[in-house]
Image: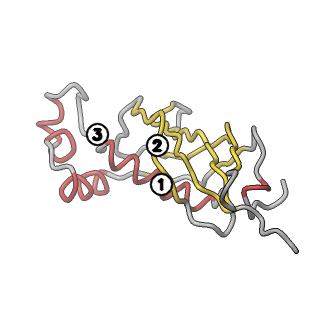
Amino acid sequence: MAPVEWFDDLSIGMRFRSPEVKVTEADIKRFAAEFDPQPMHLDDEAAKKTLFGGLAASGWHTAAIAMNLAVQIRPFGPHPLIGMGVDGLRWTLPVRADDVLHLEGEVISLTPSKTKPQGIALVKWTMLNQRGEEVYTFTPIAIVPRRPQVS
């Protein structure tokens, strides 16, 4: 696959895959303590009494991991990941301590701007655990610069 540098280098069906990351119990509790201090994310015994049946990462922790992995992939080459919103955000399974996660993406829509030197790219991202189970999906509405026109 040719390197992606501009919106014009993307094509429908293009796929991306991230490296893997292992989520530890300490990671889950550290994130939760600062951003989502609820028992199912902080306390093993209390978590057993919730619908999760045990310690689970905050959904926002899962989202933050996915964002980090998407940045590592660099789907838009040297350009930052800038979005106008997110469609299809779903937490489908809890993320547990010792899960090994990776992110896969597929370009599903490309819309060039009629007035600006950019386009809107939709990449459907799916985070999977070590068993290949989907744990999280989201489709950001990304703004990607177009290749400069040579005069």
Q: Is residue 43 left or right of residue 114?
A: left
Judged from the image, the secondary structure of the residue bearing numbered disc 2 is strand
Under circle 1, the secondary element is helix
- Side of 25 where 45 appears, left or right: left
Residue to which mark 2 is pinned: 86
Report the disc number at residue 22: none
Q: Residue furthest front?
A: 115
Q: Amino acid at mark 1?
A: Met
Q: Earlier in the sequence, mark 2 or mark 3?
A: 3
- Name above or below for residue 118 compared with residue 36: below
Residue 54: image location, x then y, percent: 23, 34
CA gap, disc 2 and disc 1: 12 Å
Q: Quadrant of residue 41?
A: top left
- Of the two numbered discs 2 and 1 on the same chain, state the one appearing first in sequence: 1
Amino acid type at circle 2 is Val
State how far apart marks 1 and 3 are (Cα). 19 Å
Q: Which mark is residue 67?
A: 1
- Check disc 3 and report the residue beneath it: 56
Badge 1 or badge 3: first in the primary sequence: 3
Q: Find out whether the residues at labels 2 and 3 contact each other: C-beta distance under 8 Å.
A: no
Displayed quadrant of residue 143 = bottom right
Q: Residues within 10 Å of mark 2 (few under 14, many from 20)?
A: few
Label 3 SS = loop
